[in-house]
Amino acid sequence: MTKMIAGQALIKVLEDWDVDHVYGVPGGSINHTVEGLYLEKDKVKYIQVRHEEVGAIAASADAKFTGKIGVAFGSAGPGATHLFNGLYDAKMDHVPVLALVGQVPQENMNTNYFQEMDEGPMFEDVAVYNRTVTTAEQIPYVINQAIREAYRQNGVAVVILPENLTSTEIDYVPTKTPKVVKNNYSQNINPDDIENSLEMLKNAKHPLVYAGRGLLGAKDVLTKFSEQFNSPVMTTVPATGVISTDHPNFIGTFGRLGTKSGFEALQHTDLILFIGSEFPFARFWPEGVKIIDVNNNPYDIGKTIDVDYAVIADAKSYLQALVTLPNETWLKANQENKANWDKWLDKLSKDDSNGLNPETITSKIAEMAGPNDTYGVDTGNVSEFGVRGLPMNHNQRFAISGLFATMGFGLPAGLAGALSVPDAQAWTLSGDGGFSMVAPDLITEARYGLPVINVVLSNERLGFIYYEQVASKQHLYGVDLTGADWAKVAEGLGGIGFTVKSIKDADEVFSKIKELQASGNKKPIVVNAVIKQDDPVATAFMPLDAKLYGQDAVDEYSKKYHIDVKEQPSLGEILRAQGDNN
């Protein structure tokens, strides 16, 4: 038993749960939590961000990169409300985050005091655990319970801390719980579920695996299943990396962020093993396809699409229990289709005759990427380029704002990557729209000596929304952006800036970045890549099979996106050439 202020005891509980850094901005109503961080600064690093939103997003990205809880704080009133964007991102993508929220002293509550507000109801929708502490002595217990619930429910825990309580001296007794509670159980799968799944797989001619974040950490099992079953694998965007992106059985994803091979596989499959995901766009899959839905949360089964068979199970344990069956023609056709797509992207990366293609930049990142690197990818068209071009072929980690899809995710995720995986390079990929929302926190990267490589794809346009306005025949309004020299901005905020406008520039700049890395650079880097304004190829609907869509549709689509159908025949044509006419 040791006497200390409750704010210090709070931080000691974080230490017990292996939290080594916390994001936030000081304020009058959170000062003694900050004092606790000072007193424990040798154990827990305080990261002073320039906006609480950045801290909350970074905490969510910490959890996405590592599976460990991320922690952020904000003071009463505006500090608390600024946290919401990152907290909702964590809620929607089911990752554990702890939010420490300041409150005015108890004697000033309910008196219309400066920055006072009723914070509890505010967090009800976003939090799986939402408590306001009422005594100083209970603070360590409540923080411990909050972390347990965040892990148990894969969500956001909020603890509201009246400032007079965190400043009160208490007798602190460490808890044993964090040291003995571990999620290391293995699950026994119902044998009937395995038998019924196998029967459906056996009867399917073109089965397809669609994998979600529930398979994070199960790369070896998913890969083994895919190889033994000869099954192509698609993933949701947030699950990028659950199978290596250079594995021949990986064929991409579906929708605006997708691939030709992914779109066409869905048009020809007759059964989808939908596993570990609540993918919201499953509702747009073709009708008539049988679906086996595997999820450890019964609420998520059938939430976005009707399913034919439901399995309530841990995704990894389920795959381990399955016996495999062969289906080589279907797999080989999908492999060929994906290889053709990859060749086409590579061709784009080597052509700047009409302006710089984003594929040039992602190919340069791929050349430099190390086996443990982290990628924080922002929202918008940049998400498409990141998903299609960033390598996830070793132990790289990928984080994106999946269901919440908030702009401004990239740079905060770079902070998280550099802090949570310090022995690897942290990359961020942003559009100029998202980057402009959070650019001031380049100062934070500079302050803590974090050499994050921030790549900005600049085209002075909100490209994703531009596409939507064109598709819905709206007036183009509000989607043009006033440009900025992001390389100079980087220099002004304590970093190093480069501008890239051509393949030649890219070669030179990435060579300089390699030199900086070799010399032990500790400054953040910004690569302002000025790309052409062309829309990325639309993969949500790709009418390239004349048998399915008619020759006129094929001609119109291939002309618009400069696709040579001889170089990229449809999956249907490949299957028919192999004698599969289904």
Image (cartoon, rainbow, N blue to C red):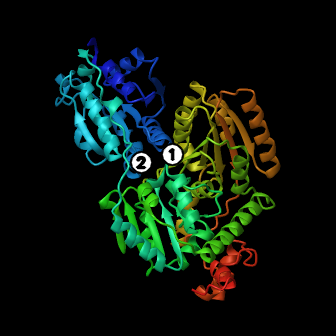
| Vertical comparison of 357 with 144: above or below | below
Which residue shows up at 69% across the image and 47% down it? Answer: 365
Labels 2 and 1: the sequence-earlier one: 2
The numbered mark at residue 326 is: none
- Residue that carries the numbered disc 2 in the rendered image: 89
User: Residue at image x 68%, y 44%?
Assistant: 369
Vertical arrangement, residue 110 with respect to residue 149, above or below: above
Q: Is residue 334 above or below residue 572?
A: above
Q: State the residue in front, 83 or 452.
A: 452
Quadrant assignment for the N terminus:
top left
Can you give x and y, in whole percent of width and height, for residue 2 in the image?
Answer: 28, 12
- Closer to the camera, 489 or 319? 319
Q: Secondary structure at mark 1?
A: loop
The kind of residue tagged 2 is Asp
Along the line of sight, the residue nearer the viewer: 308 or 153 = 308
Hey, what amino acid is under mark 1? Phe
Q: Is residue 169 in sight in this rendering?
A: no
2 and 1 marks in contact (CB < 8 Å)? yes
Q: Which residue is mark 1?
A: 409
* Residue 124 in which image quadrant: top left
Left or right position of 477 against 291: right
Q: Is residue 574 above or below residue 131?
A: below
User: Is 145 on the left-hand or right-hand side of 566?
Assistant: left
Calculate the distance from the C-alpha at mark 2 to the C-alpha at mark 1.
9 Å
Q: Position of residue 198 (x, y in %)?
A: 43, 72
Residue 150 visible: yes
Residue 373 % position (x, y):
62, 41
Q: Which is nearer the eye, 191 or 422? A: 191
Q: How many marks?
A: 2
